[in-house]
Amino acid sequence: MDAVDRAIILATQEGLPLVAQPYHAVAERVGITPGEVMERLGAMLKSGIIRRIGAVPNHYALGYRANGMTVWDVPDDRVDELGERVGKLDFVSHCYHRPRHLPDWPYNFFAMVHGHDRAEVERKALQIATLLGDADRSHEILYSTRILKKSGLRIFG
């Protein structure tokens, strides 16, 4: 990572500018071309310096007031396969594998579901349960009780 990469990270760590051509705005701020901004961001993604570029919606502002982390007890040897399938559902924002903490916490697979109300989240969880079939040994829905600010690592100039 060189000084230009660092400048791009500093210019984008609070998010891309909310303009019609955000890479042009970053390029102007950093003093390079928009093409170079996109090329360098692509290289940083590929190398792992940055993990992703994506939108982080405010689900509450979009009307999704019920947000439930569904937690599942599935066979460990099937987590990757099941995660691929569940992650493709359009109502799952993210899913991942986590360690169990037996005997109190048997769940090893998590999938975040958003809904306008709890009944909608429960219907969506039922869809996941149907997709998992016999692999679903048990599950729960843990509802959000407050909004936490989501942000990644910040570096300073």
Image (cartoon, helix red, strand yellow):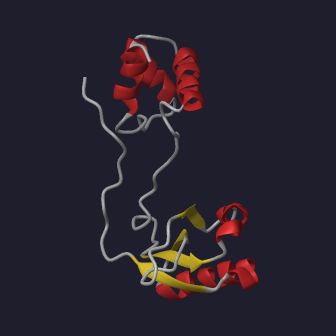
Q: Position of residue 49 (x, y in %)?
A: 48, 30
Q: Quadrant of residue 88?
A: bottom right
Q: Nearer the viewer, residue 4 or 116?
A: 4
Q: Position of residue 147 (x, y in %)?
A: 31, 66
**Residue at the image point whose x is 46% and y is 65% from the top:** 62
Tell how many labels: 0
The N terminus - image quarter: top left
Placement of 62 over or under 135, stated as above or below: above
Placement of 2 over or under 54, stated as above or below: above
Q: Quadrant of residue 76?
A: bottom right
Q: Position of residue 144 (x, y in %)?
A: 37, 75
Q: Nearer the viewer, residue 94 or 138?
A: 138
Q: Nearer the viewer, residue 80 or 148?
A: 80
**Residue at the image point whose x is 48% and y is 85% from the top:** 118
The C terminus - image quarter: top left
Going by the image, does 106 lie left or right of 133? left
Going by the image, does 52 lie left or right of 60? right
Q: Looking at the image, which residue sits at the far front?
A: 103
Q: Looking at the image, which residue sits at the far left?
A: 156
Q: Position of residue 30 (x, y in %)?
A: 39, 16
**Residue at the image point whose x is 51% and y is 33% from the top:** 20
